[in-house]
Amino acid sequence: MGFIEGYTRKFNYPDESMVKSERDLKKLGIKTYFCSNVCALYDKSKYQELGGFVKKTIFNEDMIMAAEIIGAGYQIAYAADAKVFHAHRYTYRQQFARNFDMAVSQRQYRRIFENIKSENEGLKLVKKTFQYLCKSGKLYLLPDLVLQSAFKLLGYKLGKRYDKFPRWFVRKCSMNKWYWTD
């Protein structure tokens, strides 16, 4: 795992445990629904009661499920002391495609994501990573941060408008090309 990716993990998985509910939407925004099924545990009865994961989505099935859980009046616990080792070493192109697909899912599930902005959390991540690199004396990684961030943002912005583009272009942008086959 690279230095920037390592910091991204720390940013997304902080050292403090917390329980999140609908009351946290104003304070945490999209992070209220942040849940990675790579390291999530679901109460089977609640999972079944809410219909399980959505049947058709390109990305974010875990966050959509988290939003459904919170919307039903339940809470999500984040256990900071749990240990899961999972990371990606995405190329700039892969970062673009991943963020394109994330934006597609947010657009398709507007009822969940329209009132909370991913852009705010993304900008906060870039700023904090910039500060972390400066403080750590890793200034040589700043161009990489800028390029990663630019590819993520471009993918996200295009993904938000995927329905305005021809299908061949959307497939080219997507990480999950299988999703676009009819």
Image (cartoon, rainbow, N blue to C red):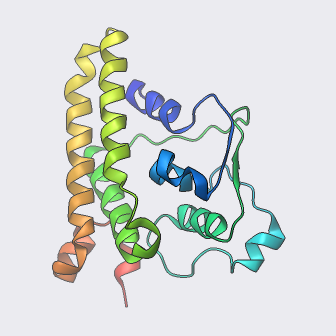
Q: In the orientation shown, which residue stands out farthest toward the right?
A: 45
Residue at the spot x=25%, y=41% of the render?
149
Q: Nearer the viewer, residue 124 or 21?
A: 21
**In this rendering, is residue 47 above or below 124?**
below
Give the image location of residue 167, x and y in percent.
22, 82
- Side of 6 relative to 104 (left or right): right
- Side of 166 relative to 72 (left or right): left
Residue at the spot x=31%, y=34% of the render?
126
Which image quadrant is residue 171 in?
Answer: bottom left
Which image quadrant is residue 124 in?
Answer: top left
Quarter of the image that includes the C terminus? bottom left
Residue at the spot x=52%, y=30% of the render?
10
- The total of numbered circles placed on residues is 0
Q: In the orientation shown, which residue stands out farthest toward the bottom?
A: 182
**In this rendering, is residue 119 above or below 124?**
below
Q: Can residue 1 be seen from the camera position used here?
A: no
- Side of 8 relative to 143 (left or right): right
Give the image location of residue 7, x and y in percent.
45, 28
Q: Can residue 97 be seen from the camera position used here?
A: yes
Q: Nearer the viewer, residue 24 or 7?
A: 24
